Image (cartoon, rainbow, N blue to C red):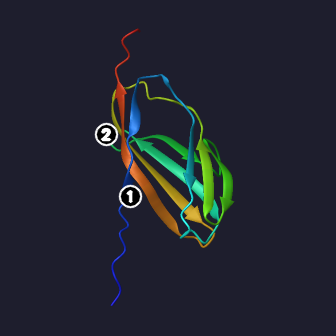
Amino acid sequence: MSAALNLKPYTWNWATCTAGDTYPAENWRESESDNLTTLTRVRINIRDSDGVLFALLDSNTTGIVINASTAGAWEWTVSALTAPTTAGIYTVDMEWTDSAGVVFTETSGKWGILPQQTD
């Protein structure tokens, strides 16, 4: 009998920012020796409290650049992003796809957007 896998995403909350402000670019690195495959895709979904998609960042299209994809040395950059103009709590998740076709949601969290006070 084998042990069950723990597939729960790591909780990572984005830093709170003000509506319409620029969220800075971020560099991510995953260097676990367990990753024996290459990284082929990274996607991030950002949704409002009603589940409506605010943004889809995708290394295959726009918003994410894979800098290194070799086994055990994955690295990518999430581009700067303009925050939603509607204040609230948004959900964010990031998933990876590797060269074996395995898709895994690595992180899941919240992004608090404060009301803009200088309109």
Residue closest to the eye, 21 or 76: 76
Tell me where residue 80 appears, x and y as whole percent: 57, 32
Q: Secondary structure at mark 1?
A: loop
SS for dot 2? loop
Name the residue carrying label 2.
49
The amino acid at mark 2 is Ser
Residue 61 % position (x, y): 65, 47
Q: Quadrant of residue 39?
A: bottom right
Separation of marks 1 and 2 at Cα, in angstroms: 19 Å
Answer with the quarter of the image where residue 72 lies. bottom right
Residue furthest top in the image: 118
Quadrant into which the C terminus falls:
top left
Closer to us: mark 1 or mark 2?
1
Residue 13, x across and y down, in percent: 37, 42
What x and y, as percent, mark residue 115? 34, 20
Is the N terminus in the top left, top right, bottom left or bottom right quadrant? Answer: bottom left
Density class for disc 1 (Cα within 10 Å; few <14, some 14-19, many ≥20) is some
Indicate whether 74 appears above or below 46. Answer: below
Q: Residues within 10 Å of mark 2 (few under 14, many from 20)?
A: few
Task: Report the residue at 63% width, 69% height from top.
Answer: 99
Name the amino acid, label 1: Pro
Residue assigned mark 1: 9
In the rendered structure, are the residues bearing label 1 and label 2 in contact, judged by CB atoms less than 8 Å apart?
no
- Residue drawn at x 38%, y 58% is 9
Residue 74 shown left or right of residue 56 in the figure? right
Q: Which mark is residue 37?
A: none
Residue at 53% x, 63% y: name it: 32
Is 74 located above or below residue 53 in the figure? below
